[in-house]
Image: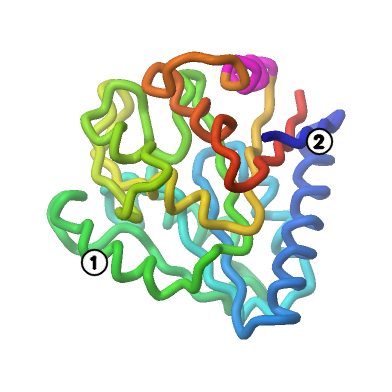
């Protein structure tokens, strides 16, 4: 299932998506003590993070976590947690509660239990999950060719996160599973550029999810995936 939202420019996309996320979180806060937001790293969402900083919301009642994380220190240039702290958790948004995925453990595998405990502190379903996608069809850190991919893509799996080492991308990683990501009221795929649009179109076709993990997002019928795209 997919709903498509196309924009002429990436800045216009960021503003519209931030406004929608703000509305969804506000709707959650109107009926529950807290709301939750799961975000992805990379360069694409940075304009979205900046736009979210302008949203008028009681951020102190919002839990924020990540769809995946590289197993590096928060001050490392490749850390998604560090990216959120620099680009999103500023001004009013600094009042939000951030639940990082990276733990002091030496490896992602050794950190799985603690990461699962942290994620369990966030009431489910999440209010909003925002995913990105790679040219190889990965989302979160569920890459083709990783040993944990089958477990990570099991829509009925019990695990909330898996440890994975991508065959080509740098750093071992920890990733939320598809089952955890689908346990949300709103699921968004945020992509820009013609290459990512092509990947999304391929994901709508039949085939093995192992070869193109993003297919699993659109094959499931649990929650609609809304696609926000700009050239």
Q: Is residue 200 magenta?
A: yes
How would you rate the neighbour count of disc 2 (Cα within 10 Å): few for under 14, some for 14-19, many for 20 or more?
some
Q: Is residue 156 magenta?
A: no
In the rendered structure, the answer to whether residue 32 lies left or right of residue 42 reads right
Name the residue: 21% across, 30% down: 147
Name the residue: 62% across, 21% down: 204
In the rendered structure, the answer to whether residue 40 lies left or right of residue 223 reads left
Vertical arrangement, residue 208 with respect to residue 172, above or below: above
Vertical arrangement, residue 66 with respect to residue 175, above or below: below
x%, y% of residue 25? Answer: 70, 68
N-term mark: 2 or 1: 2
Name the residue: 53% across, 71% down: 63
In the rendered structure, the answer to whether residue 15 lies left or right of residue 196 reads right
The residue that disc 1 covers is: 114
x%, y% of residue 49? Answer: 65, 54
Kind of element beneath mark 2: strand
Q: Quadrant of the C terminus?
A: top right
Magenta-tinted stretch: 194-202
Residue 90 placement: quadrant: bottom right
Q: Which mark is residue 57?
A: none
x%, y% of residue 75? Answer: 35, 56
Name the residue: 45% across, 20% down: 212
The residue that disc 2 covers is: 5
How would you rate the neighbour count of disc 1 (Cα within 10 Å): few for under 14, some for 14-19, many for 20 or more?
some
Vertical arrangement, residue 58 with respect to residue 195, above or below: below
Kindly report the distance in space between the C-alpha atoms of the residues bearing marks 2 and 1. Answer: 37 Å
Instruction: Pick out the residue farthest to the bottom.
Output: 33
Q: Quadrant of the N terminus?
A: top right
């Amino acid at each position: 299932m997919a709903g498509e939202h196309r924009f002429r420019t990436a800045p216009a996309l960021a503003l519209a998506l931030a406004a929608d996320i703000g509305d969804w979180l506000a709707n959650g806060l109107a009926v529950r003590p807290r709301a939750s937001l799961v975000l992805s790293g990379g360069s694409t969402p940075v304009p979205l993070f900046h736009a979210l900083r302008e949203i008028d919301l009681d951020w102190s009642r919002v839990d924020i976590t990540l769809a995946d994380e590289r197993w590096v220190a928060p001050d490392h240039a490749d850390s998604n947690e560090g990216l959120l702290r620099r680009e999103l958790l500023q001004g009013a948004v600094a009042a939000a509660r951030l639940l990082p995925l990276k733990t002091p453990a030496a490896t992602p595998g050794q950190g799985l239990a603690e990461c699962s405990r942290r994620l369990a502190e966030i009431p489910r379903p999440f209010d909003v999950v925002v995913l990105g996608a790679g040219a190889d069809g990965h989302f979160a850190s569920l890459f083709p060719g990783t040993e944990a991919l089958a477990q990570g893509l099991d829509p009925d799996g019990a695990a909330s996160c898996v440890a994975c080492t991508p065959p080509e991308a740098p750093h071992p990683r920890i990733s939320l599973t598809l089952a955890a990501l689908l346990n949300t009221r709103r699921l968004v795929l945020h992509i820009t550029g013609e290459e990512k649009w092509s990947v999304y179109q391929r994901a709508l076709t039949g085939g093995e999810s192992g070869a193109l993990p993003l297919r699993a997002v659109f094959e499931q019928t649990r929650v609609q995936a809304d696609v926000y795209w700009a050239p």
